[in-house]
Amino acid sequence: MTTASAPGKIILFGEHAVVSGVTALGSAIDLRAKVTVQDLSGSVLIKTKELTLQGFSLDLTSGRLESAQAAHATRYISAVLREFDVKDIQVCIDSSLPPAAGLGSSACIVVAAVAAISAHHGLGLSLREIAEISYRLEKNVQQGLGSPMDTALATYGGYLQISQDIQPIDLPPLEMVVGYTKMPHDTKSEVEKVQDLKKRYFELVDLIFQAIGALSEKAVPLIREHNHADLGRLMNVNHGLLMALGVSSRELDELVYAATGAGGALGAKITGAGGGGCMIALPGAAGVDALMVALRQARGVAFKVVTGCEGVRLEGDL
């Protein structure tokens, strides 16, 4: 039996603008997905339990489903198993990340699965190979929309700055709070919506993208210098720009306003594609607890997270 785990992620700055080559800043967080593989003669069985889903299983050998959601929810693991042509195996997924929330749940599941299968079958894949394979598989499942940042953060951890390429960046950890709207988002539709807006009003949208990129770059020294007050101000500006692009929602805005209002956050913004999913907030003097209470009172699900966390790792061979 072999278990590997990989972290989820948040985008601190740069959503949507990064699609057009503008700088973005992302970080691995300490919410993780675990994938355990073990030998199972005569079958290929996937079992999963996630934060917002009831447990179920999918038998790829017989096609037997224990849930109508099984084929959709396990499509990433199925892609990994097909990639390595794995037989006689049971794969168990245990994720603390809500799916379709903008926290990189699919990327960390793919990365953890690739790492676990590599270790279990003695393939000896390097971190670079794990990242490359995982990105290709996630992108294929998402019909070309997978982001290299998600699988890179799940593999390497820490912080990454992305524009034309991806660069690791050494920054101290941040304690933040994630607010989940409990509404899944559709990354493809949100990206297409913004890109269509850009085609219609290129000069205006391009200026917004450039402003978002400038925020991503200005945030780096602020994090390094522990200047949380100014970092929070930049988060608020970034959220306003994302609202201007039309990717916020009433539920997201309510969580942002609750965070910066009753929650006393220094700043708050969407993380991910928007339209649903999650927002992030930087605690102020009132602390994490007050912030989490405010988000829950605004009908959100609140998670305390730490940024800059470790990437994929083996949890042990049993």
Image (cartoon, helix red, strand yellow):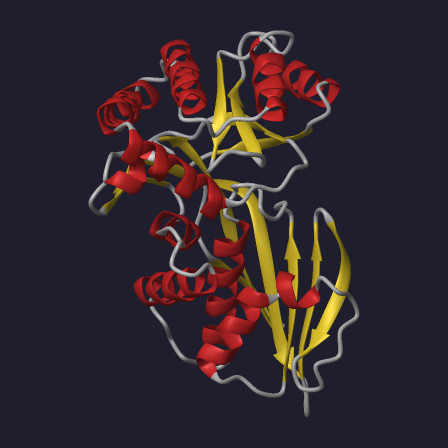
Q: Against 268, is 198 above or below?
A: below
Q: Is residue 141 above or below residue 246?
A: below
Name the side, left or right, on which 253 lies relative to 221. Answer: right
Q: Which residue is at the front of the view, 64 or 248?
A: 248
- In this view, the residue in front, 173 or 46, is 46
Which percent across, then down, holds residue 14? 34, 31
Query: Residue placed at 36% from the left, 47% from the top?
Result: 149
Q: Is residue 27 visible?
A: yes
Judging depth in this view, the residue of 192 and 275 nearest the camera is: 192
Q: Quadrant of residue 214?
A: top left
Residue 301, picture quadrant:
top right
Rendered location of residue 56, percent (x, y): 76, 65
Q: Is residue 120 left or right of residue 297?
A: left
Q: Position of residue 184 (x, y in %)?
A: 62, 42
With respect to residue 112, does 222 lie above or below? above
Residue that extends furthest to the front in the rendered view of this protein: 200
Residue occupying image coordinates x 45% and y 21%: 243
Front residue of 141/2: it is 141
Quarter occupied by the C terminus = bottom right
Marker count (numbered): 0
- Quarter the N terminus occupies: bottom right
